[in-house]
Amino acid sequence: MTIPKERHVLVIFPHPDDEAFGVSGTITTHIQQGTPVTYACLTLGEMGRNLGNPPFATRESLPAIRKKELLASAEAMGLTDLRMMGLRDKTLEFEDDEKMVRMMEELIEETNPSLIITFYPDFAVHPDHEATARAVVRAVRRMEDRPKLHCVAFANNTLDVLGQPDIVYDIKDVREHKMNSMKAHISQTAWMLEEMEHKLQNGDTETENWLTLERFYTYRWDQDFE
């Protein structure tokens, strides 16, 4: 499927590297088509699991490392409008719901997107992912003229409940941009990238498809999570 031209795309995820795995090819393509893209990253991922063995970072130094990696990922995609929203990793589920919704409303009002990309509520596994998705959906629900809402879903029951993705983009033309976006987050992705490279060298088509196809669900208001 060809990625259509949009007025403005707003991407909202909680962690550095969330954008790299699932949507960096789509972001890159929008940018290359001349569509403005804003990426709002809610935290700096300071509670990331990987501190190295032997350690390359401490809890105190990791935020600065992940900030630098996020900036490198943005550069790999050609993204110039990166917002670091300053919330704390692994605490988004405890943030005041209305505060979170207002943050999303302000982003939407400022950028006036024709498309928003985020996680799908109840199908995003991590509590920070879920809190982000809920806030975005609540904000969009309040709008009279709603932008399109494309969601990433990867819970184990996704196919059983939501079925096949509504949208599948072939992003092989920007494959290297996606690879570079993932490599930018090397503090957290080193082991995964090593395993992925090994599979690609052995002709693993599933890995190649994961790398070159990006999948989205159109949010289904008739199956609302609330």
Image (tube, grey):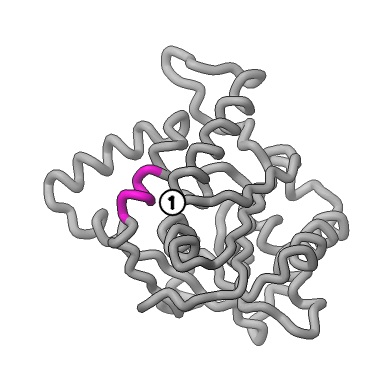
The one of 11 and 136 positioned closer to us in this rendering: 11
Q: What amino acid type should be assigned to the residue bearing mark 1? A: Phe
Above or below — where is 124 with respect to 56? Answer: below
Q: Is residue 150 left or right of residue 85?
A: left
**What residue is shown with label 1?**
21
Residue 121 appears anywhere in the view: yes
132 is within the stretch colored magenta: no
The one of 26 and 47 positioned closer to us in this rendering: 26
Q: Residue at x 60, y 74 (%)?
A: 7
Residue 127 appears anywhere in the view: no
Q: Residue at x 46, y 78 (%)?
A: 4
Question: The magenta stretch spans which residues?
Answer: 175-180
Image coords of residue 103 (percent x, y): 81, 57
Image coords of residue 72 (percent x, y): 49, 37
Image coords of residue 50 (percent x, y): 49, 28
The one of 200 and 26 positioned closer to us in this rendering: 26
Above or below — where is 73 with respect to 149? Answer: above
Q: Callout 1: 10 Å neighbours few (<14), some, many (20+)? A: some
Q: Main secondary structure of the magenta part?
A: helix
Q: Quadrant of the C terminus?
A: bottom right
